Image (cartoon, rainbow, N blue to C red):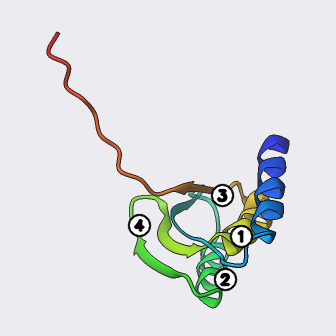
Amino acid sequence: MRFFSTIVAALAAAQGASAVDVQKSVIVSFPSETTDDIVNRAKDDIRKAGGIITHEYQLIKGFAAKAPQKILETVSAWSAEYHAVIEEDQVVSIQNDPS
C-alpha cells in the first residue's frame, strides 16, 4: 500500500507541473461490504470535478468513469481506507494460439 501511495504522490507532483488536467477512463471498485454512501461520495466527487460516470455496475460494487487525473488521485487517497481499486479502463483480449 505504501508503494501505491508513493506512486500517487509522484503522479500528483508531475501533474502539478502541467496546466491541463488529463481526463482518464477508469473503473472504480469497492469491496462488497462497503456502504453505498462511500461509493456515492466517490461518484459525487468525480462529478463535481467535471467528470462523468459512464456506467454503474450491478454485479460488483463499482462504476466506470471519465474524470480528471487530479480528482482520481484525491478519491484514491481518501478511499484507500475502504480498499477501493481505481484502474485504467482498457480493452482486454485473449489470443487463441492454435499451436
Image point (49%, 72%), residue name:
65
What is the number of the mark on residue 2? none
Mark 1, residue position: 75
Provide residue 64's location: percent of width, then percent of height. 46, 68
Provide residue 92's location: percent of width, then percent of height. 35, 44
| Label 4 Cα neighbours within 10 Å, binned few <14 / some 14-19 / many ≥20 | few
- 90 relative to 66 in the view: left or right: left
Contact between labelled residues 2 and 1, with CB atoms less than 8 Å apart: yes
Provide residue 8's location: percent of width, then percent of height. 77, 56
Provide residue 84's location: percent of width, then percent of height. 66, 58
Contact between labelled residues 2 and 4, with CB atoms less than 8 Å apart: no
Quarter of the image where one finds residue 41: bottom right
> Please, what secondary structure does the residue beneath circle 4 have?
loop
Between label 4 and label 2, give the one nearer the viewer: 2
Quarter of the image where one finds residue 68: bottom right
Q: How far, Cα to Cα, is label 3 from label 2?
A: 14 Å
Contact between labelled residues 2 and 3, with CB atoms less than 8 Å apart: no
The amino acid beneath tag 1 is Val
- 5 relative to 83 in the view: left or right: right
Image point (17%, 9%), residue name:
99
Mark 2, residue position: 45
Label 1 vs 4, first from the N-terminus: 4
> Please, what secondary structure does the residue beneath circle 2 have?
helix
Mark 4, residue position: 57
What is the number of the mark on residue 84? 3
Label 1 vs 2, first from the N-terminus: 2
The amino acid beneath tag 3 is Ala
Label 1 vs 3, first from the N-terminus: 1
